[in-house]
């Protein structure tokens, strides 16, 4: 057994909007249910709006432990979800992002906007700096994230990041594949 812990808590980064394809909501709902079925805890930004609200309610309603972390100033905008197992109010975004990082063993990224991009790239750059080795699993629903995958490849191809940095993202097509990756990862740790 190596000294990297098993994944018991996953952080989900995703949109505070629904996006304009119903598939995005369906996949968010599916992911929440799968997180609960896999007996994983969920960490997320505590809001009730957009895909993040969908994931959280689905995980909560299927019995998952759901930990929400929100800065004080976003309470009115992202409308804090009720019924969370834990709710943490932070002073600012930096504290929120740090706490979300610290409380999680892995990150799953669904479609989202600029906030989701920021959170994902930050976890990638922290991994690049060897500040963590937590998996970052990108769910490329309907190819939504293909431009990001291409951009990372371009950055590597043009010599601004090493080829290993292209491996920082584990790309999957579905929520099912994201959870299968986590289960295989945990099985590997048990050997
Ligand atoms: P978005 O993907 O833009 O819909 O945002 C998703 C989540 O990221 C929301 O909970 C936002 O509060 C959060 N967010 C927005 N901007 C930032 C930022 N600069 N850094 C980190 N998170 C952010």
Image (tube, rainbow, N blue to C red):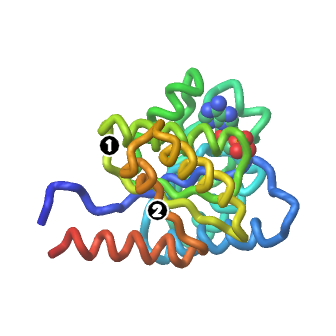
Q: Residue at x 64, y 45 (%)?
A: 116
Mark 1 is surrounded, within 10 Å at the Cα level, by few (under 14), some (14 to 19) or many (20 or more) other residues, namely some
Given residues 56 and 171, the one toward you in this image is 171
Check the picture and name the quadrant holding the N terminus: bottom left
Quarter placement of the C terminus: bottom left
Quarter of image, ligand 1 = top right
Disc tally is 2
Q: Which residue is mark 2?
A: 170
Can you tell which of label 1 and label 2 is closer to the viewer? 2
Residue identifier under label 1: 132
Q: In the rendering, which numbered label is found on residue 60?
A: none
Q: At 60% from the left edge and 73% from the top edge, which residue is drawn? A: 173
Residue in the image at 46% along x and 43% along y:
124
Point out the tag, 1 or 2, that comes first from the N-terminus: 1
Secondary element at tag 1: loop
Q: Position of residue 41 (x, y in %)?
A: 45, 60
Q: Residue at x 50, y 70 (%)?
A: 178
Q: Residue at the right extreme?
A: 20
Q: Is residue 187 above or below residue 115?
A: below
Q: Report whether residue 80 is seen.
A: no
């Amino acid at each position: 057994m190596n000294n990297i812990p098993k994944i018991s808590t996953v952080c989900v980064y995703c949109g505070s909007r629904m996006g304009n394809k119903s598939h995005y909501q369906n996949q968010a709902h599916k992911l929440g249910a799968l997180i609960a079925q896999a007996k994983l805890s969920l960490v997320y930004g505590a809001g009730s709006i957009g895909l993040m609200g969908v994931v959280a309610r689905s995980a909560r309603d299927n019995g998952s432990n759901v930990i929400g972390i929100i800065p004080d100033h976003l309470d009115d905008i992202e409308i804090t979800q009720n019924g969370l197992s834990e709710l943490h109010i932070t002073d600012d975004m930096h504290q929120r992002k740090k706490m979300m990082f610290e409380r999680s063993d892995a990150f799953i990224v669904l479609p989202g906007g600029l906030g989701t991009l920021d959170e994902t790239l930050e976890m990638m750059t922290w991994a690049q700096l060897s500040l963590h080795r937590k998996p970052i699993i990108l769910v490329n629903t309907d190819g939504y994230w293909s431009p990001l995958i291409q951009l990372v490849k371009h950055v590597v191809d043009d010599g601004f990041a090493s080829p290993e940095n292209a491996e920082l993202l584990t790309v999957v097509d579905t929520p099912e594949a994201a959870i299968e990756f986590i289960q295989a990862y945990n099985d590997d740790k048990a050997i």
